Image (cartoon, helix red, strand yellow):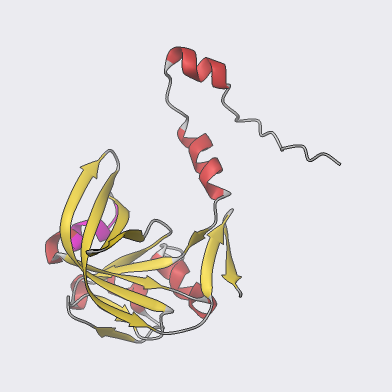
Amino acid sequence: MSVQPSVRAFEIEESASRSTNRPAYADSLKAALRVLGGGVSIITAGEGEARTGATVTSATALSVEPPRMLVSLNRASSTWPVVERFGHFCVNIVGEQHEFLANQFAGRGGLKGPDRYRGGEWTRLASGAPVLQDAVAAIDCEVEEAIERHSHAIVLGRVVGIRIGGGETLIYREGRYFALSR
């Protein structure tokens, strides 16, 4: 039995791409990345009425020795200027019970700033960034460095606090959320 890979209409011909050194198309890159499931995190930053945040699948460990996190934030988003201003952020790794919060922080429903925090219980750790109390895990960071490239800022965070909760991790793939069960 042979398995045939599916071919999509937006496929870029490899030979044409190589011969012209033409970059991949943004829509094709987005489509390719949608098939890669990613862990869902809510990045939070700020204080009081200056709080905001975003739902991302781009949070990852840069290193464990020393403990550093990396997150990619769109520079046009409302989150990046707050992270830059306050010099902190928290990576709140969320579970299936947080899908509504993931949607709010993704901007669905039109909520902005501190209104995105509705429906969650929040606290703070060392950096002062908001921490979701019942997150599967929360990694509190102070900004160590930010590298601004193209449409995004690659933010490197020095880990200053960790809180491990429990539950199943939420995954995002092809425009949908899935609970990752053991």
Magenta region includes residue 43? no
Residue at 32% across, 82% down: 163
Does any portion of residue 43 appear in the rendered image? yes
Task: Please name the residue shown 19% across and 57% down the image.
Answer: 81
Seen from the viewer's position, the closer of residues 58 and 67 is 67
In the image, farthest residue toward the front: 65
The picture quadrant where one finds residue 57 is: bottom left
Is residue 111 at least partly visible in the picture?
no
Q: Quadrant of the N terminus?
A: top right
| Residue at the image point whose x is 50% and y is 42% from the top | 30
Which residue is at 52% across, 70% downward? 170
Q: Is residue 45 left or right of residue 163?
A: left
Q: Is residue 78 highlighted in magenta? A: yes
Residue 94 versus residue 124 in the image, above or below: above
- Start and end of the magenta stretch? 77-83
Q: Specify the quadrant that holds the C terminus.
A: bottom right
Q: Position of residue 88 (x, y in %)?
A: 18, 67
The picture places residue 141, in percent across and down from the top left corner, at 22, 69
Q: How many marks?
A: 0
**Image-quadrant location for residue 94:** bottom left
For the residue pair 45 and 17, the one nearer the viewer reads as 17
Asked if residue 9 is positioned above or below residue 159 in the image, the reply reads: above
